[in-house]
Image (spheres, grey):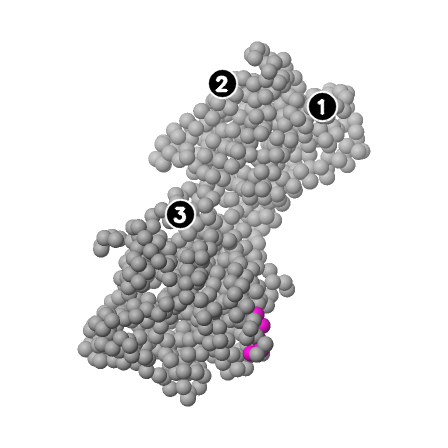
């Protein structure tokens, strides 16, 4: 099997806006408010552990993991709980969260107990996949099968984003050590750090550690969605993850570079996950890579970047291909917030829709070998059995089909919603 | 920003490729410019009149029927313009105005709007119109005028001239073999030959086709599989029965084959969506064209071949699927 990346697109990357901006640590004042959602991960929301008016410390656990797939939430500041209520979320509209007024802005986080089992430390620290998928890391690192390869994902294939790139340059050693810790604890034979070839200095930075730490560096073609797990595994190892299965099925675990750094911080220093790097870019006066506390309102990030450039029309949380647009900038940074991208009206594409002209561009662009143009018809006609038969569950929602569509059909949107209906059919079949 | 300004919320992705439907259609028009120029060079006034009338009638019918159907008037997607130009290229230069009017009606209304408009029609609208006209008014649809370079043809008279394909077919039917010597072939290549507006210059059509492939508007799969499968039948037949068939060279460079292979069969709405499907479709077109030209009663088989294969497109698309990565069986 060759490394046969199929499909994919080459969007305008726009990374130069922030690629050369070193990570800047955001500073906070007394009485500022952070709003920490109790659900910042895939799975069950955390159970709140604090009450209104309670004084809490930076790094204190304020939400406890509830259920198998869930994780802990910590306060990113020392302060007083002023209210518990609904916060704006681009994902779900509203999400339950805790508003905290800062009393001691310079407090470092309270450390966690690092004498426990490896996976328990990760859970205790509340680490999730920081590439944007936010799957609880301790679950991913408890594979029920033998894993032979750990792939560290430094592809960062989303346009605009440079947060991973800056971490790779500025925290190379932490990433390597975090990944090594995972490799050793899970007794994984091989470790490969994979980076797209539009980041040669990040590749060089890793190469300098590769001898001493015994891992390989893989230079990847620059193509979206190279950083998708299934694409990455195909590109790096030539292995195909079966439809509906996880990478562990083919003996692989993929971890994002920022997640590896968080693992290092937790295991070596006892640091819970209370901050992350966010690329703030697009139509802001001074685009930046910022190290921010979880719960910081996006409005503050934009202010720090000199404010809006012109009139904002759309704000995207995450990357422009898979990120969510938010109805308001009054929404907090979460563990999965890799970017904040501001678009003016003139930056946005013309979305004038026509009927599908069957040009086949979506078929060519689909990195999963699907036929979006025909599947769209099934989705519109609510023919979910057909949609299942045409492998909608293999759709990774990367958005390549919508991106290339000259008729501006919202293809991936149909599949996102269609998948939920299709899952119902699958469950019914399993119950029979 | 003003405090309460609502931000735009949409599905991802938030960025798009710059290519849109109207640009794709416009590129098809650009690709046809060399062939249009050649036809105007040789047929002068006749060509101009045919193009202008077809475009006016076609756009008018498109607008009218979109209005009747209560839809937005989407002439700006340029799809009707493409249909108009392709229809004009499928008409004889001397077509009377009423033939053009009827052709435009059939193409837009019967060929496209009754199915639901852009993207919904199973058959190539321009070909539906051509075949309708050919069967209903065979005399007008096969009365060819002799091409005369524009500098000489400001007199609006014309001399009739048969196409090589029709002349050979007539001779073959009445005498059992081809009598005329068609060995001087240079004229066919350049367009100095009787035929429909878009049939006369193979080189201009190839140029346009290559432009479309270069711009990634079409892929090579349909033209190549079409022409290759056609030649694979014509060449052996010609070698064995030289008195019953024109040379492969004449077959390729006269008649509607180039227009068909590069511009009609590749119409994305009416051809398969996957590369594999497109090759099957192209082979079907090639085989049917060869069989009709060699054994059928009509001298020309391109329109029929493509329309027949159009009918198979939903079937091809349904059964010829690419393999999805690591796909599971869902019974």
Region of the chain picked out in magenta, as a range: A213-217
Label of residue A432 in the image: none
> Disc 1 designates what residue?
B168
Name the element at disc 1: helix
Image quadrant assignment for residue B244: top right
Report x, y in % for residue A338: 39, 65
Name the element at disc 3: loop
Q: Is residue A277 above or below residue A124?
A: above
> Disc 2 designates what residue?
B97
Q: Residues within 10 Å of mark 2 (few under 14, many from 20)?
A: some
The subunit letter for the residue under badge 3 reads A
Viewer can see residue A213: yes
Spatial separation of the CA atoms under disc 3 and disc 1:
55 Å
Spatial separation of the CA atoms under disc 3 and disc 2:
42 Å
> Disc 3 designates what residue?
A349
Please identify the quadrant where the N terminus of chain A is shown.
bottom right
Q: Nearer the viewer, residue A421 or A172?
A: A172
């Amino acid at each position: 099997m060759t490394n046969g990346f199929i499909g994919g697109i080459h969007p305008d990357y726009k990374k130069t806006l922030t690629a050369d901006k070193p990570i800047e640590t955001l500073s906070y004042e007394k009485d500022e408010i952070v709003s920490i959602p109790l659900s910042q991960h895939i799975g069950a929301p955390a159970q709140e552990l604090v009450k209104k008016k309670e004084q809490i410390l930076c790094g204190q656990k304020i939400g406890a993991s509830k259920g198998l797939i869930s994780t802990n939430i910590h306060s990113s500041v020392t302060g007083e709980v002023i209210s518990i209520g609904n916060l704006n979320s681009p994902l779900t509209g509203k999400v339950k969260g805790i508003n905290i007024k800062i009393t001691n802005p310079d407090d470092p986080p309270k450390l966690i107990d690092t004498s426990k089992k490896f996976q328990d430390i990760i859970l205790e620290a509340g680490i999730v996949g920081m590439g944007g998928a936010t799957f609880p890391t301790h679950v991913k690192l408890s594979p029920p099968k033998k894993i032979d390869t750990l792939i560290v994902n430094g592809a960062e294939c989303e346009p605009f984003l440079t947060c991973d790139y800056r971490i790779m340059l500025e925290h190379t050693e932490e990433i390597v050590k975090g990944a090594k810790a995972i490799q050793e604890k899970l007794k994984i034979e091989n470790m490969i750090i994979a980076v797209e070839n539009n980041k040669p200095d990040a590749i060089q930075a890793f190469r300098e550690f590769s001898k001493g730490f015994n891992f390989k560096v893989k230079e990847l073609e620059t193509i979206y969605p190279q950083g998708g797990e299934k694409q990455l595994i195909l590109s790096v190892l030539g292995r195909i993850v079966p439809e509906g299965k996880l990478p562990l099925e083919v003996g692989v675990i993929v971890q994002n570079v920022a997640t590896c750094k968080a693992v290092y911080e937790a295991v070596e220093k006892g640091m819970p996950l209370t901050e992350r790097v966010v690329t703030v870019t697009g139509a802001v006066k001074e685009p930046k890579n910022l190290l921010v506390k979880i719960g910081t309102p996006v409005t503050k990030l934009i202010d720090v970047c000199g404010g809006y450039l012109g009139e904002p029309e759309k704000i995207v949380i995450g990357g422009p291909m898979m990120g969510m647009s938010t109805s308001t900038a009054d929404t907090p940074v979460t563990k999965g917030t890799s970017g904040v991208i501001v678009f003016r009206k003139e930056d946005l594409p013309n979305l004038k829709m026509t009927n599908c002209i069957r040009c086949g561009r979506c078929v060519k662009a689909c990195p999963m070998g699907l036929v979006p143009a025909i599947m769209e018809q099934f989705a519109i006609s609510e023919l979910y059995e057909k949609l299942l038969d045409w492998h909608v569950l293999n759709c990774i929602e990367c958005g390549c089909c919508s991106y290339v569509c000259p008729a501006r059909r919202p293809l991936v949107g149909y599949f996102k919603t269609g998948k939920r209906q299709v899952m119902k059919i699958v469950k019914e079949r399993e119950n029979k | 920003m003003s405090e309460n300004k609502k931000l735009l919320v949409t599905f991802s992705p938030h960025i798009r490729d710059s290519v849109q439907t109207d640009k794709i259609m416009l590129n098809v028009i650009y690709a046809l410019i060399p062939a249009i120029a050649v036809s105007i060079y040789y047929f002068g006034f006749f060509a101009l009149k045919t193009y202008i009338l077809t475009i006016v009638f076609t756009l008018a019918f498109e607008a009218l029927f979109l209005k009747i159907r209560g839809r937005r008037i989407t002439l700006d997607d340029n799809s009707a313009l493409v249909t108009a130009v392709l229809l004009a290229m499928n008409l004889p230069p001397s077509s009377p105005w009423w033939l053009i009017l009827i052709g435009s009606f059939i193409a837009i209304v019967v060929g496209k709007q009754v199915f639901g408009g852009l993207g919904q029609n199973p058959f190539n609208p321009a070909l539906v119109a051509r075949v309708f006209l050919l069967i209903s008014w065979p005399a007008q649809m096969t009365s060819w005028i002799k091409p005369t370079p524009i500098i000489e043809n400001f007199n609006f008279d014309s001399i009739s001239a048969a196409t090589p394909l029709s002349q050979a077919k007539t001779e073959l039917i009445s005498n059992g073999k081809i009598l005329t010597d068609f060995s001087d072939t240079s004229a066919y290549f350049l367009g100095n030959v009787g035929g429909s507006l878009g049939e006369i210059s193979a080189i201009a059509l190839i140029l346009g086709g290559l432009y479309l492939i270069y711009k990634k508007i079409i892929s090579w799969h349909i033209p190549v599989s079409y022409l290759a499968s056609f030649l694979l039948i014509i060449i052996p037949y010609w070698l064995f029965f030289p008195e019953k068939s024109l040379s492969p060279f004449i077959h390729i460079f006269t008649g509607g084959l180039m227009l068909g292979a590069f511009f009609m069969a590749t119409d994305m709405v009416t051809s398969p969506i996957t590369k594999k499907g497109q090759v099957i479709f192209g082979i079907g077109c090639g085989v049917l064209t060869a069989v009709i030209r060699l054994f059928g009663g009509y001298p020309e088989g391109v329109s029929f071949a493509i329309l027949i294969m159009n009918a198979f497109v939903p079937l091809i698309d349904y059964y010829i699927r690419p393999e999805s990565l690591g796909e599971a069986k869902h019974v």
